[in-house]
């Protein structure tokens, strides 16, 4: 579905009855790391701005504020199942993926270069959103999310996946210690560890996520790769590599429309 609003965003999965989107910054002021849409409450933005953005989003989705679920992410492998609203905010600390079967509950995660992943099993009515940075990717948080979705009734063969805006392989130059982690965890392929850039290697994070998703049973044909790089498109998306970590975040949202 396509909600109406002033928030600019990109649609991720074209499925009726499902909201799946990543926000764009909108109005960007060059010198301001938070200008535009930012709903992240722990990366240094003014809380009044964060609250206003959340209210705007909830108006667009036509849900009460308590139905917008945004965890405090820590690059953990922890997945929370949202089984009731209002949901205890203390249980949203140190969480990097969310799963629900509840309609009109918007699951959201914040990213600025890491990979946001939405997953939907329409038939079972199970949805999820995942934050997969390089640590989450080597730790296979996408697989952990699928395991929780299966507990809620999903079938990996039916899960459709889209990745939102994140850093591309051209932009994601990494040190040897990061490359080593990808090698140790079974991601040593030429599609994932890009060694053609000279002295330093680059990593293609979406391709690494894709590999984990396929290993967890999702058909490759059900997986959509990102359409935009966060770092290559600074007026559209926040990028921690470009702006530093004290900056806004892209919000990726999935919701079953009730
Ligand atoms: Zn890029």
Image (tube, rainbow, N blue to C red):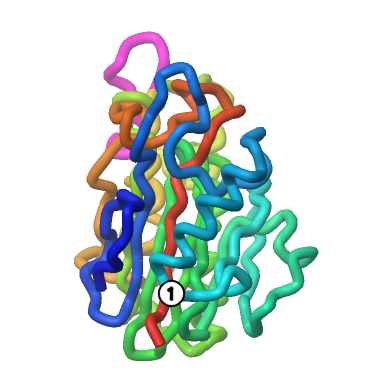
Tell me which corner region of the image, top left, top right, bottom left or bottom right, holds residue 11: bottom left
Residue at 41% across / 57% down in the picture? Answer: 117
Judged from this view, the residue extending furthest toward the right is 90
State the quadrant of the N terminus: bottom left
Q: Which residues are magenta?
A: 189-201
Provide residue 155's location: percent of width, then percent of height: 40, 84
- Compared with 43, 159 (above or below) is below
State the quadrant of the C terminus: bottom left
**In this rendering, does residue 84 appear at all?**
yes
Residue that badge 1 annotates: 62
Whether residue 15 sits left or right of residue 150 in the image: it is left
Provide residue 72's location: percent of width, then percent of height: 67, 52
Whether residue 13 sits left or right of residue 242 in the image: it is left
- SS at mark 1? loop
Q: Is mark 1 within 8 Å of ligand 1?
A: no
**In this rendering, does residue 210 appear at all?**
no
Whether residue 47 sits left or right of residue 140 in the image: it is right
Residue 157 falls within the magenta-colored stretch: no
Residue at 59% across / 28% down in the picture? Answer: 245
- Compared with 139, 97 (above or below) is below
């Amino acid at each position: 579905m396509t909600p109406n609003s002033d928030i600019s965003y990109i649609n991720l999965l074209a499925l009726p009855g499902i909201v799946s989107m990543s926000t764009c910054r909108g109005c960007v002021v060059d010198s301001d790391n938070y200008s535009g849409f930012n709903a992240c409450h722990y990366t240094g933005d003014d809380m009044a701005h964060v609250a206003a953005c959340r209210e705007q989003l909830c108006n667009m989705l036509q849900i009460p504020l308590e139905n917008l679920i945004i965890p405090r992410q820590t690059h953990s492998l922890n997945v929370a199942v949202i089984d009731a609203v209002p949901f205890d905010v203390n249980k949203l600390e140190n969480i990097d993926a969310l799963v629900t079967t509840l309609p009109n509950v918007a699951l959201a995660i914040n990213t600025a270069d890491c990979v946001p992943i939405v997953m939907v099993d329409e038939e079972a009515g199970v949805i999820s959103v995942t934050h997969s940075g390089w640590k989450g990717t080597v730790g296979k948080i996408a697989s952990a999310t699928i395991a929780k979705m299966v507990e809620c009734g999903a079938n990996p063969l039916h899960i459709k996946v889209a990745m939102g805006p994140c850093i591309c392989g051209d932009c994601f130059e990494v040190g040897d210690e990061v490359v080593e982690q990808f090698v140790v965890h079974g991601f040593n392929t030429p599609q994932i560890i890009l060694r053609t850039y000279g002295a330093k290697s680059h990593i293609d994070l979406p391709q690494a996520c894709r590999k984990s998703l396929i290993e967890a049973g999702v058909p490759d044909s059900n997986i959509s790769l990102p359409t935009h790089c966060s770092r290559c498109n600074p007026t559209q998306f926040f990028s921690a590599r470009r702006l530093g970590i004290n900056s806004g975040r892209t919000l990726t949202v999935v919701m079953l429309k009730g």
